[in-house]
């Protein structure tokens, strides 16, 4: 049977409590310009390369989302794990795990202001 659901991920939703703070955090992580005056609740779509999008979702006004997980929900790619780690340190972002290295794959995990964990990885 042919499925009407495509084999692709369109958008990853990250649930946040403070949309402007999260826009700043993710924009600085990705080296993207941002204008907090243009950020309006409840959602902000990050400019992401390729097909999959990233939407920061503060939800309805007055509703606090509990969204932190112990494991990363998604990853951002890097070609240089050491440079990425150093960059995150310079931003003073919370680093949850040191660099883990395998033969053809390396990663580390960071945490956003809401406790959402994001993996930065090669390979």
Image (cartoon, helix red, strand yellow):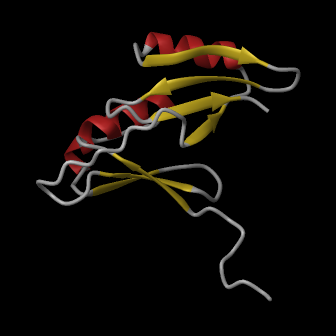
In terms of depth relative to the viewer, which is nearer, 104 or 66? 66
Q: Residue at x 25, y 40 (%)?
A: 20
Percent x, y of residue 113: 32, 29
In the rendered image, the vertical position of residue 110 relative to residue 70, given as above or below: above
In terms of depth relative to the viewer, which is nearer, 53 or 65? 65
Q: In this view, does 110 lie to the left or right of 102?
A: left
Can residue 47 be seen here? The reply is yes
On the image, which quarter does residue 24 sit in? top left
Residue most extreme to the left? 62
Percent x, y of residue 84: 61, 19
Percent x, y of residue 96: 50, 18
Q: In this view, does 89 lie to the left or right of 59?
A: right
Q: Residue at x 53, y 34 (%)?
A: 71
Total numbered labels: 0
Locate the C terminus and report the quarter of the image it occupies.
top right
Percent x, y of residue 110: 50, 24
In the rendered image, the vertical position of residue 72 relative to residue 86, given as above or below: below
On the image, which quarter does residue 36 sit in? top left
Residue most extreme to the bottom? 1
Locate the N terminus and report the quarter of the image it occupies.
bottom right
Can residue 31 be seen here? The reply is no
Q: In this view, does 9 lie to the left or right of 89?
A: right
Residue most extreme to the front? 70
């Amino acid at each position: 049977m042919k499925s009407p659901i495509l084999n692709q991920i369109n958008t990853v939703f990250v649930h946040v409590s403070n949309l402007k703070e999260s826009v700043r955090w993710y924009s600085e992580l990705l080296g993207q310009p941002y204008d907090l005056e243009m950020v309006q609740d409840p959602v902000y779509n990050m400019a992401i390369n390729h097909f999959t999008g990233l939407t920061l979702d503060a939800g309805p006004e007055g509703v606090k989302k509990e969204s932190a997980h112990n494991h990363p929900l998604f990853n951002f790619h890097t070609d240089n794990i050491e440079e990425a780690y150093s960059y995150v340190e310079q931003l003073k972002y919370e680093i949850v795990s040191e660099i883990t290295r395998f033969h053809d794959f390396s990663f580390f995990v960071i945490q956003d202001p809401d406790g959402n964990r994001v993996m930065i990885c090669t390979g």
